[in-house]
Image (cartoon, rainbow, N blue to C red):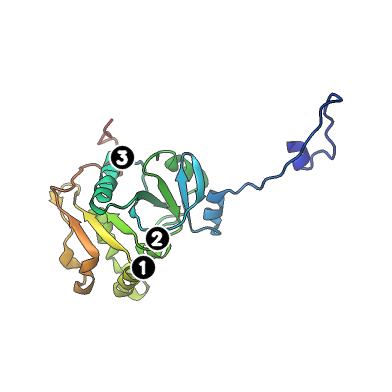
Amino acid sequence: VLAWHMRVSDTVTLALSPDEHLDVHHQAYADHLANLLCGTQQVIYYDNQTFTSWHASPSVILSGSFNPLHDGHRALLHTAMNMTGLPGYFELSVTNVDKPTIPYQVIRQRAAQFTTPTLLLSRAPRFIDKAQLMPGATFVLGYDTAIRLLDRKYYVDGDIDDMFAHIANAGCRFLVAGRRMEGQPFQLFDIASVPSKWRHLFEILDEATFRYDISSSQIRQGRFLPRT
């Protein structure tokens, strides 16, 4: 079949008995991950080792690079799901404003870490981009991600008001968890750093609600072992 399909041979001789015959059926193969990488799809869904199309619905979304996925990620998403009553997904953007596009095989390796909740893959590196693809989403942020959200260098003319307006119009909001940064005590996100007209989009998870002192970078550097 491969020889015939690749036109290596015009005819393939099969040693069939008189009562045997060959039926040929054609089915197009959709490589959703390849479509995502070339830009013909903007968001796809990974579940049970399969990439498929995804249809947006109000959900809790925890975005990250997941290199690697760890218990802190899982605990934070489950906390947000319990608080909101919404279904939850991890989300990995294959494009990044600061880094090259993640290669095909690396994406497959990272996706293989996920069982339940399942994974979305997108071409949405910024939350203004994610809101367009995932209307009604509650985005779950760690402390450092929330700080980057307010970095004006990621927006045209540094206009964070325009960014927040798009996110609000898409019906999206944020849950922000605190974090113990390297060499510092546990810190909560300062809501006063957000322009007052957009603070209603944020809910801060206090230390009693969620604290998990682990990071992917610590695991990669061998300074923290994931829980088993």
- At horizontal 40% and vertical 64% (from top left) the residue drawn is 129
Vertical side of 158 occupied by 39: above or below: above
Mark 3 belongs to which amino acid?
A: His
- Gap in angstroms between the C-alphas marked 3 and 2: 24 Å
> Which residue in the protein does label 2 denote?
134
Relative image position of residue 121 (x, y in whole percent): 44, 51
Vertical side of 41 occupied by 183: above or below: above
Label 1 or label 2, whichever comes before in sequence order = 2
Secondary structure type for disc 3: loop
Nearer-the-camera pick, 133 or 179? 133
Vertical side of 127 occupied by 85: above or below: above
Label 1 or label 3, whichever comes before in sequence order = 3
Residue furthest to the front in view is 19
Q: Badge 1 local density, few (<14 within 10 Å), some, or many (20+)?
A: some
- Which image quarter: residue 173? bottom left
- At horizontal 44% and vertical 39% (from top left) the residue drawn is 112
Residue furthest to the right in view is 18
> Which residue in the protein does label 3 denote?
70
**Contact (Cβ within 8 Å) of mark 1 with mark 3:** no
Mark 1 belongs to which amino acid?
A: Ala
**Contact (Cβ within 8 Å) of mark 1 with mark 2:** yes
Looking at the rendered image, the disc whose residue lies closer to the viewer, 1 or 3, is 1
Nearer-the-camera pick, 220 or 46? 46
Looking at the rendered image, the disc whose residue lies closer to the viewer, 3 or 2, is 2
> Which residue in the protein does label 1 denote?
170
Label 3 or label 2, whichever comes before in sequence order = 3
